[in-house]
Image (spheres, helix red, strand yellow):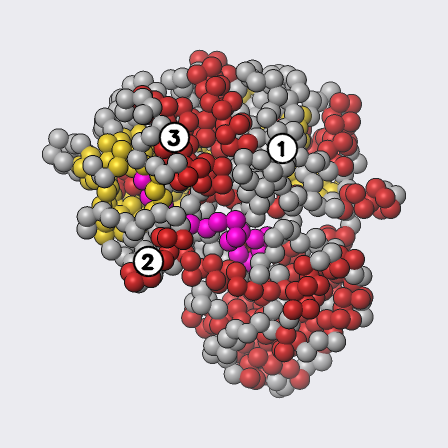
Amino acid sequence: MDFDVCIIGSGAGGGPVALTLAQAGYKVVVLEKGPWFTEDDFYKDELACCLRTTYTPDLHKEPQVVEIEDDDGAFHAQSTDGSRYNFWNGNCVGGSSNFMSGFFHRLKPIDFKLKSTFGPIDGAHVEDWPISYDDLEPWYDLVESEVGVSGRVIDHPHAEPRSSKQFPYPPLNEHTIAGLIDVAGQKLGMSPFPTPRAILPYSAKDRNGCAYNGGYCGSTGCSTGAKGSSRAALLNRAVATGNCEIRPHSMVKRITTDGKGDITAVEYTDRSGQSMRVDARVYVVACQAIETARLLLNSRGEKHPDGLANSSGQVGRNLLFAGGGAGSGRLDINEFDPEQAKAMMQTGTFINRAIQDWYVIDDKEFGPAQKGGTIDFVHIHPSPVSRATRQTRGSEGLVWGKPLKRRLENHFLGGPHIKIEAFCDWLPIDDSRITLDPDVRDQWGLPVARVRAGFHVRNLQVGWYLASKGAELLRAIGAEDVVSFASGEPPTNLVAGTCRFGEDPRTSVLNADCRAHDVENLYVTDGSFMPTGGSVPYTWTIYANAFRVADRIVGELGGSK
Amino acid sequence: MKRREFLLQTSGLLAMTAVQSLRIARAQDLNGSFPNVATDQTGLSARQWQTIVAVQNHMLPSEQDSPGASDVNAETYLKWVMSAPDTRSEARDFLRDGVIGLESLARKLTSKTFSQLNEEQTEQILRQYEQDHEGRHWLRQILEYVLEALLTDPVYGGNPEGVGWVWLGYQPGYKRPPADKRYVDLLKMREARPRGDLLTENIRCGGTPPTGKS
């Protein structure tokens, strides 16, 4: 055997496994399809992060196919090459965790038993989890110290139980708007609380503290290491043990199996295009939900005719996104005295406020008690070109010339914009799934993922409900031009599902330990395992679960050496 | 170049007023200060560029207190974009076909070349061109590249002295890209390379060269 453990993918699902196993004395290899960027390769550069594909693949060489539903319920397929969709979220060591905002919310006890609490929902495959919040809580707690989570615990109606009293790091410096939200929220009977962030407020853990770029964290890599990416927080330490080797530019093409159905090796292509293979005692797949499903479906074998670990036919099914509602508003800078205005217009510190008063919606006008979600209040992304480009859209065509210049001045100089991000519990449905595209191939000749991105109407209803509550609060702090809305458009940055875990091998891909029902030594540790998503961004849960599963793998291999 | 970098790396930029930064930007020889990269692979003639420049200036006109396309180096910026290694030939063809379409519309409706038109005629022709699907797409793209020249990091050659940022009160984040880490440099780290180059890469990454069986 080349290694004890072979991990495919180096993001939030791979990092905890690499660190835990390497620290336990096992030889680990991590295969990452992208390059190994460091802090010296990450800049607040809009062209690099957001207007060109720098940290994700060239879509011409590595497209995906997306199927979007029209108003009449018909699905239309198109290649992402040349479309406005891109489901790649960061292909480099550390994966998309390099580019997350790091808004860290835990799931809550109720998220583990949605079906038994609220009953089934027509047209959705809601299932209870095979584990409880109590099973995952110690691992959420571990993430706080291992990844570095900053914040301030305060009590609010849906606050989840926690074993540590406070976060290991104090909250990041807050923008004046946070105080306005607290005051207005209390008046309205809402309970705004500080959003925990996977960002170090000061230097710690051999990483530098936050450089304070406000809304810039999402989509851009962190130049100081303050953001708790899998790379900065976990993989650098895994490599330092001497037990973990990371192989960048290693595109895994398939996992091969023998006549008995056991895994024989992982086949990958290295940077020069040469075919390589590696074998290990345990294999861990963590390529993010879409590509994990694609890799398993592309890994057919004599005993796995429909793809590896797919005897249930569930691989690729029940793809989840995170989002549902959104909105925005703006404070008029002329309403503040010069000193206040200066504080309002600085964009370094964080708003960091969230509301979970409607994590369960018990509102007769809305219907029977049901799962609601989280409302985050954040800066709009500061990317100036993208914001300026939005100002060119007029009701009668493009806006240019002096009218555009006045619009730009108004948009950029008229006062701070605040964005609402509302997270419903994105429902798992038949029309949200991954298959292999029958025609389109990537640069290695492999069938690409076909993303069918339908949505349940409940996402819109709940998204709308939550966003309008957020809008109410924005109006209460004096914001103007407040809008709120819901959308079924797949938010491409947060994905889960496709290999749900469960007790029954006929209806789930993985068991409660995230080991494949069909294959003894295969684990999946990214967000694919989630049968339902919770109403929060997934990253903290992915980290926590990957640490939990890593602990099981150490046990399977015979404990720490 | 050094002076410019120094200015932008310090808080001097934020302390400048829009008028001050505009004065400094306008005093510069823009072509002289452009990063030393290819801008001649565009496949368009000088006359076609004249037309594009006229469109850019109409879309973002210079005013006394605020920068226009000519102040932010929009022409050279677009030439650089069209010459960039990740720009596909289809993009250059699209840019050229769009110019040809606009010039022929101008000739048809005014019997003049586009760059000879006065402001009112320019507006009329562009609005007419906007009615056409391809024309609208082309105009949107020209406008987006003007805004890139106005608001991307000065390391890309537009936005001299951060003149666009200062005008709109934009505060750049930390860190800003140095001249050897523009996105085109990062792309080289991303792309496949011949096997001979691999050893150095693996050492830099702290790993060892792959030893698996092929």
The numbered mark 1 sits on a residue in which chain? A
- Along the horizontal axis of the image, is B3 left or right of A196? right
Q: Which mark is residue A23?
A: 3
- Ranked by sequence position, the earlier of labels 3 and 1 is 3
Residues tagged 1 and 2 counted as in contact (Cβ below 8 A): no
Q: Residue at x 57, y 30 (%)?
A: A149
Q: Nearer the viewer, residue A60 or A481?
A: A60
Whether the residues at callouts 3 and 1 have beta carbons within 8 Å, the answer is: no
User: Which residue: 48% across, 49% down?
Assistant: A38
What span is in magenta? A29-48
**Residue under numbered circle 2:** B198
User: Is label 1 in a helix, a strand or a loop?
Assistant: strand
Residue A451: x percent and y percent?
38, 42
Residue placed at 57% from the left, 18% from the top? A164
The 10 Å Cα crowd at callout 2, few under 14, some 14 to 19, many 20 or more, is some
| Looking at the image, residue A20 lies above or below residue A93 | above
Kindly identify the residue that appears in the image at 13 percent across and 30 percent down.
A260
- Chain label for disc 2: B
Q: Amino acid under label 1?
A: Asp
Residue linked to disc 1? A376
